[in-house]
Image: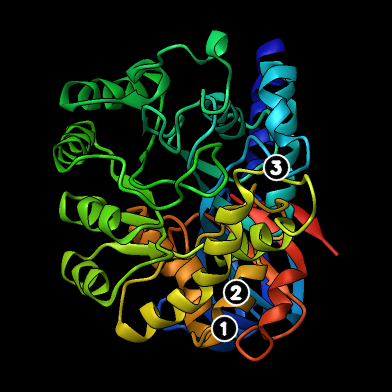
Amino acid sequence: MKRLILLLLIFSCASIFAQDTYIHCGKLFNSETAKIETEKTIVVKGDKIDAVLQGYAQPKNADAIIINLKDKTVLPGLIDMHVHIESETGANKYLEPFVLNEADVAYNAQEIAQRTLMAGFTTVRDLGGTGVNVSLRNAINQGKVQGPRILTAEKALGTTGGHADPTNGRNKELIGDPGPKEGVVNGVRDARKAVRQRYKNGADWIKITATGGVLSVAKSSKNPQFTDEEIAEICNTAADYGMKVAAHAHGDKGMQRAINNGVKTIEHGTLMSDETMDIMKEKKSFLVPTISAGKYVSEKAKIKDYYPAIIVPKALEIGPKIQDMFGRAYKRGVPIAFGTDAGVFPHGENAKEFMYMVEAGMPEHIALQTATFINAEVLEMPFQIGQLKKGAFADIIAVNEDPTKTITAMQNVSFVMKGGTVYKKE
């Protein structure tokens, strides 16, 4: 008898899990063609899309769920290629390493992850934190907390005194001499060990800071900070371990070193020359522009004491230039991937990037394609995310207007499904 009850319970649970969902879509964004299609039905089984049908199909199974999105535009879940899921901008940001425990960082990151998901971003690439990002990724994958799929670089790699040196700005007692374990590289041997350490710690990608940066407590925002040999070793070692490399870069010389030695994506790219754009086209490297971050830091730098004094001139110089560079890069044919640098500005506002891209000359439908189909290709997940096709994860969002006509519609996501589970429905 007990065995029969157990079997019935197992069958019941399996039936619930297998319950079909039919989503009736008034408009649907086909991310592969970057075109709007009308009157479609997405059939979801478990965590995957089982079919995309023409018309408003009715389920044969009486237990199936019907979701009516006939007055919405439906898109694949969005992908942001550049976030910092562990932290967020604020006037006290530079005190946090000294006052927050790892548990504080983790709880903050979990709330940020949920906020990101509610904004329609079902996958993100996290490009640098303390390592809590790895634990958060695992907790989300195990269903313990809500959030987007995370591919993480764990801790970014820098050089001594460089943009990702975690001890910049500290006094002599605290500054120490961090090395590969802490993500600080000086020489080819360090480069190899730092990548292997990231692999050991659970990273999916490697991030380097190929040039100086705006928000680090250091003077330069643009000088090259890795040698050719160091970058080549990082890229070669990463390839051995099945990872690709992203490079933070504002200065042109550092960008060229990164691209020529195998980096897949250039983050920011602020002072990129026409020559570097042509190298990116040749090498098939992608620009992740992060216009949102540039606009935010240049605005906040005008507020007294929002940033440490050493940062202010860098923010005022670099921030306003990113959007113009992006417009030139797009017109020149540089491959573009969507990424925002969320964390430098408030998480959940990631979709403002679409508006800035369109302002700079990219058509709405292409901007949407960068955050879906293109990003999935860059992440080597083309048949899993970024598309509404049979076999892909059921990562599905909806907005109230047609974003190919009104791009600001992306800032008000009214429906979010990730992996077949509905997280938001207004």
Labelled disc at residue 354: 2
The count of marks equals 3
Q: Amino acid at mark 3?
A: Glu
Q: Which residue is disc 1 drawn over?
A: 358
Q: Can residue 26 be seen from the camera position used here? A: no
Residue sitting at x 58%, y 21%: 170
Labelled disc at residue 105: none
Which quadrant: the C terminus? bottom right
Horizontal arrangement in the rendering, residue 163 relative to residue 394 (left or right)? left
Residue 156 position within the rendered picture, expressed as x and y whole percent measured from the top left: 43, 34
Residue sitting at x 59%, y 85%: 359
Ranked by sequence position, the earlier of labels 2 and 3 is 3
Mark 2 is surrounded, within 10 Å at the Cα level, by few (under 14), some (14 to 19) or many (20 or more) other residues, namely many
Q: Dots 3 and 1: beta carbons under 8 Å? A: no
Q: Is residue 369 above or below residue 364?
A: above
Q: Quadrant of residue 183?
A: top left
Q: Secondary structure at mark 3?
A: loop
Residue sitting at x 78%, y 41%: 91
Nearest the eye: 145 or 255: 255
Q: Amino acid at mark 2?
A: Phe
Residue 202 position within the rendered picture, expressed as x and y whole percent measured from the top left: 41, 25
Q: Dots 1 and 2: beta carbons under 8 Å? A: yes
Q: Secondary structure at mark 1?
A: helix
Which quadrant: the N terminus? top right
Q: Quadrant of residue 149?
A: top right
Horizontal arrangement in the rendering, residue 282 relative to residue 199 (left or right)? left
Residue sitting at x 58%, y 29%: 142
Mark 3 and mark 1: Cα distance apart in space? 25 Å
Q: Amino acid at mark 1?
A: Val
Nearest the eye: 26 or 150: 150
Q: Can residue 361 be seen from the camera position used here? A: yes
